[in-house]
Amino acid sequence: MSDAQVWQAVTEQAQVWAELPLVSRFARELPYNNRESLTEVPTHLGVLEAHGAQITGSPLRAGSTVAVFSQVRLPDDERQVLTASWQEWLDAAHRIERAHRDTIAWIRSRLPGYPLLPAPHLAPHTALTTDEFSWRLTWPPQDRAAGIQFTGSPQQANQLLNASRRTATVLDRAAQNLSTTLQHSDAWQQLKATHKALDSPSRSRLIETRTKVKRLLTPQALDIHDTRMIERHNHRTAILQQEINQLDGAARAYCEAFDATDQLIEFAASDVFGQLALHGEPRRVSITDLDLTPGTVPQAHFSVSADDFSFTSGLIVRPDDPLLPEACHVTGMTWSFSHTSESRRVTARVLSGSEYMWR
């Protein structure tokens, strides 16, 4: 299964979502889509972004992001009064996020061995299981107890999105197509092989690692480390990787395959999908000083004008350099200054196989 087929399946699902009235009304108020507006919703969302909330980068998670950052990042006099327009938008944000998480949970339920997955990543209080703040799309334990692996499509998404019966059929078909496409990916097939290769000693090592991760990430241990939400998230990630690094053989291979597959699901079916569904097709950007870093996940580094204030992490863009025909997902930026000019240096993930997409 080629990467191009994954992007095609993601695009088809995004187009269905974008046409839903609930989604299109929600998207119109996002800061990236409403950059010149001084109305209430995009203005307040812009304030939250300035305080670190990734509204533009992860628009499908806006409901929970707004809730967290409104409480911990804004002073009392900047917290939003719940006017009717703000409450209407926030209600839509929560419905869309729940529908999205329901869809991701359903795709994950197709993983080999589900729901009895031995991955240490799913120990309590990791970045994938915490009920606190996380940059990752978490795995609520109730999902794995709900029997969704026996259902033919996401069960709650259509109702949450106010889809008509006809549209619900199209939504189901798009989710099924994306799930099937991901299941044929190299990462998923590698996970299937490593899961099959687990013997009794390897499973025992995974269980031991999972138990140790749980002990190292108790709420008390996290409180001792730090009380700030982003630092706690980073600590969860570091502890998990520390323990996985001590594994070898079939157990280590399984952990790496599980992480690669879950990262693929999250990147394709959430990050890329969210940008296409809520911000539309990638825009063309003028770049200079391109450097490329090949690898399993190829990276691009380039400079863009400092005057483009809409440029931010999380966006998918199409650089205008012929040496980089693929679209890119922006992952980071730094500013550079000289006595004559200033610019931004961008790091981005190259979407391999996307050279003929979104033109």
Image: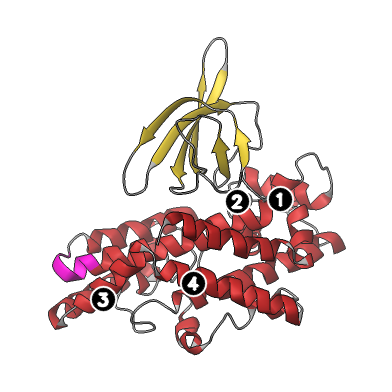
Q: Are marks 4 and 2 in contact (CB under 8 Å)?
A: no
Label 3 – label 4 distance at C-alpha: 19 Å
Q: Which amino acid type is shown beneath numbered disc 3?
A: His
Residue at image coords 47%, 72%: 180
Which of the marked residues, 3 or 4, is nearer the chain's N terminus? 4
Q: Which residues are magenta?
A: 247-253
Instruction: State the mark number for residue 195.
Output: 3
- Residue 356 in the image: x percent, y percent? 53, 46
Label 3 – label 1 distance at C-alpha: 43 Å
Query: In terms of secondary structure, what is the magenta stretch mainly?
Result: helix
Name the residue carrying label 1. Answer: 45
Viewer-side residue, 133 vs 149: 149
Name the residue carrying label 4. Answer: 179
Instruction: Judge from the rendering whether residue 285 lies leftward or rightward of residue 113; answer left or right.
Output: right
Label 2 – label 1 distance at C-alpha: 9 Å
Against 160, is 240 above or below? Answer: above
